[in-house]
Image (spheres, grey):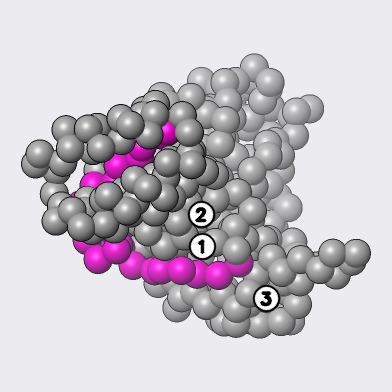
Amino acid sequence: MIVDVTGLTKVYEGKQRVVALDGIDLAVEKGELFGLLGPNGAGKTTTISICTTRARATSGRVRIAGVDVAEEPSRARLNIGVVPQYNTLDRSLTIFENLYYHCKYFGFSSSDAQARSKVLLEQFHLGERGKSFPQQLSGGLQQRVQIARAIAHKPAVLFLDEPSAGLDPQSRIAMWEAVKGLRQEGITVVLTTHYMEEADELCERVAIVDHGKVLALDSPANLKKNLGAATVIGIKLRDTVGSVALLSELGNDSLVESAEATADGVRIFAKAMEGLLPRLMEVAQPYGLKDISVSETSLETVFIRLTGRDLRE
């Protein structure tokens, strides 16, 4: 395993004790594109921070390429590339210089640092931007530079923490293509995200995380097959007092696998859709039907099944 996380816990003591991680176990194969999917505050960033030596665990162990990150942090960092949630490009340096001095920091000679920087500019389609400063680039291009810089010293593992946060759809797709291209170099990628489509698009395996625990771990296809309902239907009511009565009416419907109350109505997990929507609209109307939505099986529906709430709730 290139990334081996065992029994990882992180507890913040204070007026209110907070358990950020509660016994996380993860094993990532070399060359894998692995995702941590969960809502904000689930423990994803804390996990990445410990794996990349930016934070210390309360207990448990992390090994990157066989190196214990707590016992040998300096050695571990040689195998690690990091793109954090926030932009850390040096705004006083050009794009070329951001790459060049990163290489120098990791012991490259001047000639090797120059050569590596030029290769990265071409690889990430930034050849004409080498003399530009970060503030002259769009958010999507700046993110590309951050990824290029993170792999400049040829790490074994690249950690991406919410890599598409704040990017427009076009820049997000471009970033996805850049990440996919890293596999050709044999780089293992571990990314955190709360965008279900990002995890589905990029990751070979996904760990769904919430409240500091891994709730499920498998390929996106298997998670959807084994844990997702065929369809999730959300019904919003003007008067949520009717939720209990509506649930009672739906209890014996052969097309409904299960149903549960939500903050503003009812959520239904459907076995099949044929003829179900008209019936739902009919039975929900007396309870003040406000809105009805239909979601096909996705990692979002898997998360709902596991936690009873949306990824963005």
Sequence-wise, the earlier of marks 3 and 1 is: 3
Which label was assigned to residue 9?
3
Name the disc covering residue 209, or none.
1
Magenta extent? 212-237
Distance from Cα at disc 3 to Cα at disc 2:
17 Å
Q: Where in the figure is residue 258, as x and y percent of width and height?
A: 29, 58
Residue 29: % across, % down: 40, 72
**Front residue of 201 and 187:** 201
Residue 240 included in the magenta stretch of the image: no
Q: Toward the viewer: 287 or 183? A: 287
**Residue highlighted by disc 2:** 38
Q: Is residue 75 left or right of residue 274?
A: right
- The answer to whether mark 2 and mark 1 are in CB contact below 8 A is yes
Mark 2 is surrounded, within 10 Å at the Cα level, by few (under 14), some (14 to 19) or many (20 or more) other residues, namely many
When the figure is inspected, residue 83 is found, relative to residue 283, above or below; the finding is: below
Q: Which mark is residue 155?
A: none
